[in-house]
Amino acid sequence: MEHGGSHPKLKNQDSTRTINVINYKGTGLKIFIFSNSTITDFSYNETGAVLSFNVEGRNKTYGYVNMILPKDFGEIKPKIFFDGKETEYTVNKTDIGYRIFFTYKHSKHNIKVYLFSQQPTEEKENITNYPLTLAIASIATVTLATLIYYFSRKRATKQKIK
């Protein structure tokens, strides 16, 4: 799958603009997205500082997203995930904020922009739950082995009595 910071097949593509207002530290900030794709399901998770949206376009064409984030975010260090995988992008600091640009081959895709380079929440949860999962699996294995041993001994005892 091709995606990343630039693509030669994008010259003279039609562009649409969406403006999304999010709540950031009690104020409404405008996020501008210019794209030749259809943008849907835009959301912002303030706790994790994650922008999320879907892009969709005509198959066998290339799409792009050009986001403008206001400088009110402060110094950002974004990570962009394209269908769950980190992707290449370009970011430029401007007088009004940050410009983030990336391209992709069209179909339907999910985009997540982690503004401050945090590890994705899903991965943190998996890492956090690993010891608990291991403990539960260990207890289940020991319990099963004990039951098998108990019932095999009980069967052997019944056969000796007969």
Image (cartoon, rainbow, N blue to C red):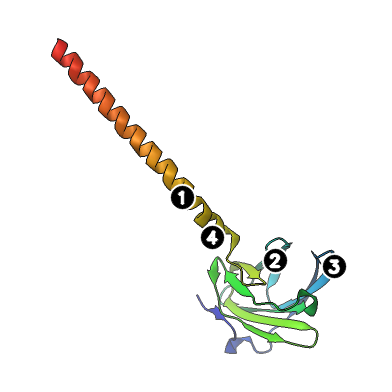
Give the label on residue 123, or none. 4
Q: State the residue position of label 3.
A: 28
Q: Is residue 34 left or right of residue 112?
A: right
Q: State the residue position of label 2.
A: 49
Q: Secondary structure at mark 1?
A: helix
Q: Nearer the viewer, mark 3 or mark 1?
A: 1
Disc 4 residue crowd, few under 14, some 14–19, many 20+, Cα 10 Å: few
Give the alpha-carbon distance from disc 4 to disc 3, as whole Å: 29 Å
Give the alpha-carbon distance from disc 3 to disc 1, as whole Å: 40 Å
Q: Nearer the viewer, mark 1 or mark 4?
A: 1
Hey, what amino acid is under mark 1?
A: Pro
Sequence order check, earlier mark of 3 and 1: 3
Hey, what amino acid is under mark 3?
A: Gly
- The image quadrant of residue 137 is top left
Give the alpha-carbon distance from disc 1 to disc 4, as whole Å: 14 Å
Sequence order check, earlier mark of 3 and 2: 3
Q: Nearer the viewer, residue 59 or 113?
A: 113
Is residue 62 visible from the viewing direction of this image? no
Q: Secondary structure at mark 4?
A: helix
Q: Is residue 42 left or right of residue 133?
A: right
Disc 2 residue crowd, few under 14, some 14–19, many 20+, Cα 10 Å: some
Q: Residue at image x 53%, y 69%?
A: 85
